[in-house]
Image (spheres, rainbow, N blue to C red):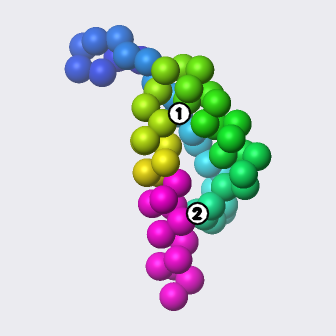
Amino acid sequence: MKLGGKTVKAMVYIMNDGRPLGQPSCYYYSTILEGYKSAGFDVEILRKATTDSIESEEVANE
């Protein structure tokens, strides 16, 4: 994809409507993590997104 006039690698995840935020299963997370590693993506971004999703779920349940 193009970002700021430069071609960059990107991964897009589109979640189906109606799916709640929350912690992914261990299997699903491991699969995504391996994809990040294979593509050379920063795995900290995935970890942060997972943490944010879990925190958002907790706030929504309060």
What range is drawn magenta here? 50-62
Q: Position of residue 59 (x, y in %)?
A: 47, 79
Tag 2, which secondary structure? Answer: loop
Quarter of the view holding residue 44? top left
How packed mark 1 is, by other alpha carbons closer than 10 Å (few <14, some 14-19, many 20 or more), is few
Q: Which quadrant does the N terminus fall into?
A: top left
| Rendered residue at 66%/50% (across/down) | 16
Q: Position of residue 37 (x, y in %)?
A: 56, 26
Quarter of the view holding residue 25? bottom right
Which numbered disc flags the more N-terminal residue, 2 or 1? 1
Q: Position of residue 40 (x, y in %)?
A: 49, 21
As shown in the figure, which amino acid type bears the numbered disc 1?
A: Val
Residue at the disc numbered 2: 21
Tag 1, which secondary structure? Answer: loop
Q: Residue furthest left?
A: 4
Left or right of 10, for residue 27: right
- Give the numbered dot on residue 12: 1
Quarter of the view holding residue 33? top right
Q: Residue furthest bottom?
A: 62
Nearer-the-camera pick, 17 or 59: 59
Nearer-the-camera pick, 39 or 20: 39
Nearer-the-camera pick, 52 or 14: 52
